[in-house]
């Protein structure tokens, strides 16, 4: 497998330094990508870079994932309009542990010579004094060179300006490359296209400090066809951590992509080969309403992120909410998983003691909750066959519901019509 060609046909390649492809074709190369530790989980915006490392390793090269324990204390100005808050060492260490566990799901850390390796730049910066740094690194890169970078020019010419802390970021990242080149024989740095300036600062430092040669490659920044930001929803980021974004919501994010985006994403975020993708596209085109591309994309990335069991739960949850599947499977889910499925669904909390003697259903729907504005309207819709509790149609307004009806001893699912769901939580 040719790594650069793989990125090209998938539409991922953006810039590549002359000589990089020739180097990669000679044999195994060590290369790295840095990951930002500002949270204890990566989100789907990081997946393009994770996929780059996966392809790099599959092509026979050695991937390094650098988690920026040191650079996280400084903040990268690339693509930012304002300086971000700096994190404490304790918070950073917590974040690094979370990110490491996620990267281990995607990369092979036990494959012999090209095993993936995690490194933390805090390890080589923690005892590096400021005076030594400006003497050993700062003297090799001119202010003129640093000022020429777009990330610097955009901030300096903006309203907020730029602190000295952020101005030095490219030197810190450049030294990362130098350190990995010197101590790990790492000849290539990769990243998103907004990282080009920082990456070539590293190649320049290696050249000026040691007369060495290093290379750079960047990938396209992911954009949605409608121009909105990829990886964001009305509820915020789509995280890889199932505690932050449930596997069901994660699956739905990919399933709900547009046809144009699905054609792009299935190349970037799956490991399907070109022939398989073209076959899926040929199947999708005459019947786009069947969402063949979206289903294949969502299945592949959900299984690789959360596993087969969580994927199956996501499918069952979709069928439950949008089909005629029974409710029994909810008993097998944890409380956070149930809440994840019903995220965004109106919910009501009632004391569990109220269920012990039983609650009249009309009261439940219009007094204990406000699913209906009045008991009269609740009775009318029940009599018309339009109300269900736990997927069972309510026969009579006088019926009662008790603790034995609670799913997992905690939940009731009410339906008003076919598609209006409400979650009642007993606590």
Image (cartoon, grey):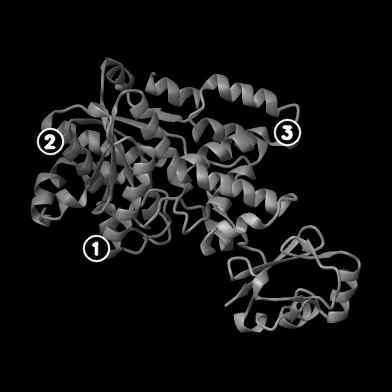
Q: Marks 2 and 3: CB-CB under 8 Å?
A: no
- What secondary structure is found at the residue carrying circle 2? helix
Label 2 or label 1, whichever comes before in sequence order: 1
Judged by depth in the image, the label closer to the viewer, 1 or 3, is 3
Q: Marks 2 and 1: CB-CB under 8 Å?
A: no
| Residue wearing tag 2 | 209
Give the crowd class for mark 2: few <14, some 14-19, many >=20 residues within 10 Å: some
Q: In front here: 176 or 413?
A: 413
**Which residue is at 15% across, 40% downward?**
140
Give the percent coordinates (x, y) of residue 113.
22, 27
Judged by depth in the image, the label closer to the viewer, 2 or 3, is 3
Give the percent coordinates (x, y) of residue 355.
66, 80
Q: Is residue 356 left or right of residue 200?
A: right
| Residue wearing tag 3 | 288
Q: Quadrant of the N terminus?
A: top left
Give the percent coordinates (x, y) of residue 204.
22, 34
| Residue wearing tag 1 | 89
Q: In front here: 88 or 112?
A: 112
Give the percent coordinates (x, y) of residue 351.
61, 82
Q: In front here: 84 or 146?
A: 84
- The number of discs equals 3
Q: Residue 163: in sight, yes or no? A: no
Separation of residues labelled 1 and 3 (CA atoms): 49 Å
- What secondary structure is found at the residue carrying circle 3? helix
Separation of residues labelled 2 and 3 (CA atoms): 56 Å
- In the rendered view, would you say 19 is above or below 251? above
Separation of residues labelled 2 and 1 (CA atoms): 30 Å
Q: Is residue 145 left or right of residue 129?
A: right
């Amino acid at each position: 497998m040719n790594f650069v060609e793989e990125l090209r046909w998938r539409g991922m390649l953006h810039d590549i330094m002359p000589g990089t492809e020739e180097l990669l074709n000679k044999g195994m190369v060590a290369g790295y990508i840095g990951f930002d530790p500002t949270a204890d989980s990566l989100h789907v915006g990081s997946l393009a870079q994770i996929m780059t490392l996966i392809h790099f390793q599959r092509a026979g090269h050695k991937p390094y994932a650098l988690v920026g324990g040191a650079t996280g204390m400084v903040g990268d100005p690339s693509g930012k309009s304002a300086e971000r808050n700096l994190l404490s060492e304790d918070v950073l260490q917590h974040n690094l542990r979370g990110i490491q566990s996620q990267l281990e799901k995607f990369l092979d850390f036990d494959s012999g010579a090209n095993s993936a390796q995690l490194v933390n730049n805090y390890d080589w910066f923690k005892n590096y004094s400021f005076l030594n740094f400006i003497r050993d690194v700062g003297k090799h890169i001119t202010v003129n060179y640093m000022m020429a970078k777009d990330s610097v020019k955009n901030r300096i010419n903006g309203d907020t300006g730029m602190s000295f802390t952020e101005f030095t970021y490219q030197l810190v990242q450049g030294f990362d490359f130098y350190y990995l080149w010197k101590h790990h024989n790492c000849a290539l740095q990769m990243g998103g296209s907004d990282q080009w300036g920082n990456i070539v600062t590293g190649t320049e430092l290696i050249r000026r400090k040691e007369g060495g040669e290093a290379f750079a490659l960047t990938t396209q920044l992911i954009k949605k066809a409608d121009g909105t930001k990829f990886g964001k929803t009305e509820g915020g980021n789509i995280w890889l951590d199932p505690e932050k974004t449930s596997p069901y919501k994660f699956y739905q994010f990919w399933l709900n992509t547009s046809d144009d985006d699905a054609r792009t994403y299935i190349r970037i975020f799956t490991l399907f080969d070109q022939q398989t993708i073209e076959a899926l596209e040929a199947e999708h085109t005459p019947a786009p309403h069947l969402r063949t591309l979206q289903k294949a994309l969502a299945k592949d990335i959900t299984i690789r992120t959360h596993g087969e069991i969580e994927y199956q739960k996501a499918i069952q949850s979709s069928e439950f909410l949008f089909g005629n599947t029974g409710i029994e499977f909810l008993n097998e889910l944890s409380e956070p998983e149930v809440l994840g499925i019903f995220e965004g669904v109106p919910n009501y909390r009632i004391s569990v003691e109220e269920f012990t003697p039983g609650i009249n259903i009309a009261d439940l729907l219009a007094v204990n909750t406000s699913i209906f504005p009045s008991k009269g309207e609740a009775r009318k819709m029940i009599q018309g066959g339009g109300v269900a509790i736990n997927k069972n149609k309510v026969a009579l307004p006088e019926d009662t519901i008790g603790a034995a009806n609670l799913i997992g001893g905690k939940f009731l699912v009410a339906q008003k019509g076919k598609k209006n769901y409400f979650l009642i939580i007993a606590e």
